[in-house]
Image (spheres, helix red, strand yellow):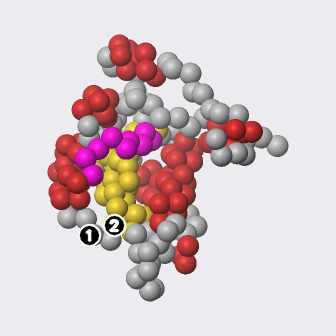
């Protein structure tokens, strides 16, 4: 048996096409997230979705990004803020697995996106406080990443520095490196 292609072939491009992502494909991404497992079936993930040239949400998300991410993310047609609810609904206790569960939902998005020839690039480089303020995010939620989503662009249509960055080899640690705390 082998690892499925949607896991092996997934990577975070910086070469996005400005072509819009069809609504049906966006819907499939978030339907995939919906089916992720979570503690007590809390489903703590929340998404704020901005579509370029369609709404102000995209512009507001873009303004939260650090400059180095703005350089390439400006070409992506969709930006999504991912947040996690930090307390359980059923008892208001802290949900220690909220980030883990939200990561599982995003993992489903990544696999679904790859199967649709879409690319997702997750960014931790954004101003969390600014995002909380702009989107009036409640105190019991924590923003985690902003994702850029879209189709891959043509290298020749984008700046040389992005073309070079895209050509870097995708390197992963050996599986034995995960079996120890070092």
What is the quadrant of the C terminus in the image? top right
Marks 1/2: CA–CA distance? 6 Å
- Estimate the x, y position of residue 88 in percent, counting from the top left: 44, 78
**x and y, in percent, of residue 164 in the image:** 43, 15
Does residue 84 belong to the magenta stretch? no
Q: Which residue matches tag 1?
A: 138
Q: Residue farthest to the right? A: 1
Q: Which residue is at a point 27% across and 52% down the rendered structure image?
A: 128
Q: Residue at x 43, y 39 (%)?
A: 121
**Residue numbers of the magenta segment:** 120-128
Image side of residue 171 versus residue 55, left or right? right
Q: Quadrant of the N terminus?
A: top right
Q: Residue furthest bottom?
A: 91
Picture quadrant of residue 72: top left
| Disc 1 residue crowd, few under 14, some 14–19, many 20+, Cα 10 Å | few
Q: Residue 158: in sight, yes or no?
A: yes
Q: Residue 159 in the image: x percent, y percent?
A: 32, 17
* Viewer can see residue 31: no
Mark sitting on residue 98:
none
Frontmost residue, 173 versus 109: 173
The image quadrant that residue 87 belongs to is: bottom left
**Residue found at x 54% / y 76%:** 41
- Residue 34 image offset from top left, x and y in percent: 50, 65
Residue at mark 2: 141
Q: Is residue 121 magenta?
A: yes
């Amino acid at each position: 048996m082998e690892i499925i292609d949607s896991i092996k072939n997934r990577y975070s491009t910086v070469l996005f096409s400005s072509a819009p992502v069809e609504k049906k494909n966006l819907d499939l991404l978030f339907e995939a997230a919906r089916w992720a497992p979570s503690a007590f079936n809390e489903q703590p993930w929340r998404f704020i979705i901005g579509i370029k040239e369609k709404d102000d949400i995209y512009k507001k998300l873009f303004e939260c990004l650090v400059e180095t991410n703005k350089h390439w993310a400006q070409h992506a047609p969709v930006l999504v803020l991912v947040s996690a609810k930090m307390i359980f609904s059923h008892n208001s206790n802290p949900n220690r697995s909220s980030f883990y569960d939200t990561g599982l939902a995003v993992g489903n998005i990544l696999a679904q996106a790859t199967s649709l020839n879409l690319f997702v690039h997750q960014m931790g480089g954004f101003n969390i406080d600014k995002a909380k303020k702009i989107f009036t995010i409640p105190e019991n939620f924590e923003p985690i990443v902003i994702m850029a989503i879209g189709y891959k662009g043509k290298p020749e249509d984008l700046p040389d520095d992005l073309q070079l960055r895209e050509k870097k080899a995708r390197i992963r640690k050996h599986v034995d490196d995960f079996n120890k705390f070092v």
